[in-house]
Image: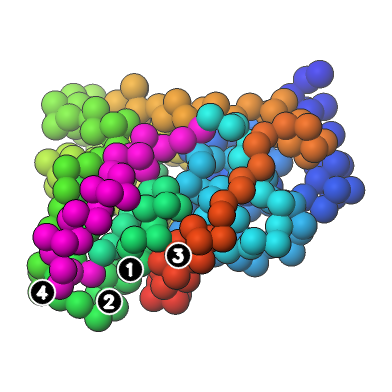
């Protein structure tokens, strides 16, 4: 089958079978074209709570599918690629977090949404790169234990100097590959380009950017800007999507190796199998985890609205 034939079949079957397809912006372009909703982690969570269909397919990584299941327990939720995890989500165990909470008993525990459902049961609120600043400002505590991404944490701490932050040593292994020397090389090659980065990058890289924000934020900035050239410091799919959206502008990857292999496990034929009911993996969580993690996600949606 050709890409076009598979896409047509998916679009036909998802209507017949009452299926909603959610796709994170790090997915390949052929998958975005068949999705009902495309976005960053915060937008996907909001959409998860509102999708009217009985079945939801998450084209992304496991913690994103878990979030959908927690917000819509009555729905069948499929993760398109069963092995697609986020390495950062596994960096801290529940036991380690319990120990940290003993060390910092007066801190609000703020978890990046890139965490397992189990870990969320021990947190006060979760945040995404798009919503973290607003949510942390709104939390009723001046002391924040921010897990697990200390780069995003430091970026947020710089926006909110009136609160004190404690970090642990975590981060995205994909974004952490990007170095200041990559910025220097890219700027030398493209001196007129704006540098747009994800705040999962190391603070020394983020400090050199013209804009730092979520994947949706980066897309929106590039689309609105009068500038004609952009260096993109996040997963390289964003470069491709922007080239489709803005054919008159030029987009360059900051680092050619910025590819999230977990996000790339989803393929169009596997999405077709999912809408046929013979692919992906169904997300199942026990009741205790669902209830515990829901408090933390509900709080994010409440404070981030
Ligand atoms: P966004 O919330 O910006 O989409 O980021 C998710 C992510 O995993 C970035 O690496
Ligand atoms: Fe996780 Fe990094 Fe991949 Fe995002 S890019 S899903 S944080 S490994």
| Camera-side mark, 2 or 4 | 2
Beta carbon at label 3 within 8 Å of ligand 2 = no
Q: Position of residue 84 (x, y in %)?
A: 51, 33
* Label 2 sits on residue: 139
Distance, label 2 to label 4, CA atoms, is 12 Å
| Camera-side mark, 1 or 4 | 1
Which mark, by number, is residue 292? 3
Q: Earlier in the sequence, mark 3 or mark 4?
A: 4
Q: Earlier in the sequence, mark 3 or mark 2?
A: 2
Q: Is residue 266 left or right of residue 165?
A: right
Distance, label 3 to label 4, CA atoms, is 30 Å
| Camera-side mark, 2 or 1 | 1
Where disc 3 sits, the SS reads helix
Residue 302 makes an appearance in the image: yes
| Residue at position x 29%, y 26% in the image | 255
Q: Which of 3/114 is in front?
A: 114
Q: Rate crowding at label 4 as few (under 14), some (14 to 19) or many (20 or more) other CA atoms within 10 Å.
A: few
Distance, label 2 to label 1, CA atoms, is 9 Å
Q: Rate crowding at label 2 as few (under 14), some (14 to 19) or many (20 or more) other CA atoms within 10 Å.
A: some
Q: Are marks 3 and 4 in contact (CB under 8 Å)?
A: no
| Camera-side mark, 3 or 2 | 3
Q: Earlier in the sequence, mark 2 or mark 4?
A: 2
Distance, label 3 to label 2, CA atoms, is 19 Å
Beta carbon at label 1 within 8 Å of ligand 1 = no
Q: Position of residue 40 (x, y in %)?
A: 47, 52
* Label 4 sits on residue: 162
* Label 1 sits on residue: 124
Q: Are marks 2 and 1 in contact (CB under 8 Å)?
A: yes
* Bounds of the magenta segment: 84-108
Q: Position of residue 6 (x, y in %)?
A: 79, 28
The C terminus: image quadrant: bottom left
């Amino acid at each position: 089958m050709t890409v076009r034939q598979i896409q047509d079949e998916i679009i036909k079957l998802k209507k017949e079978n009452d299926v909603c397809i959610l796709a994170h912006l790090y997915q390949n372009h052929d998958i975005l074209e068949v999705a009902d909703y495309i976005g960053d982690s915060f937008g996907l969570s909001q959409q998860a709570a509102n999708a009217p269909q009985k079945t939801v397919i998450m084209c992304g990584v496991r913690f994103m599918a878990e979030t959908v299941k927690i917000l819509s327990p009555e729905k069948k939720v499929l993760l398109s690629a069963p092995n697609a995890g986020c390495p950062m989500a596994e960096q801290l165990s529940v036991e380690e977090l319990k120990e940290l909470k003993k060390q910092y008993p007066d801190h609000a525990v703020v978890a990046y949404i890139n965490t397992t459902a189990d870990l969320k049961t021990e947190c006060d609120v979760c945040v995404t790169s798009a919503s973290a600043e607003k949510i942390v400002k709104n939390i009723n505590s001046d002391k924040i234990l921010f897990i697990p991404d200390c780069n995003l944490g430091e970026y947020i701490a710089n926006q909110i100097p009136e609160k004190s932050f404690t970090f642990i040593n975590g981060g995205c292994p994909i974004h952490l590959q990007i170095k200041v020397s990559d910025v220097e090389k890219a700027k030398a090659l493209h001196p007129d380009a704006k540098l747009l980065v994800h705040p999962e990058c190391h603070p020394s890289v983020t400090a050199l950017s013209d804009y730092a924000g979520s994947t949706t934020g980066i897309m929106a900035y590039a689309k609105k800007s009068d500038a004609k050239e952009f260096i993109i410091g996040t997963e390289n799919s964003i470069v491709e999507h922007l080239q489709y959206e803005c054919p008159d502008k030029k987009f360059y990857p900051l680092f050619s190796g910025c590819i999230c292999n977990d996000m790339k496990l989803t393929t169009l034929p596997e999405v077709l199998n999912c809408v046929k009911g013979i692919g992906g993996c169904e997300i199942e969580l026990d009741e205790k985890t669902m209830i515990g993690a829901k408090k933390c996600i509900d709080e994010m949606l409440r404070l981030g609205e």
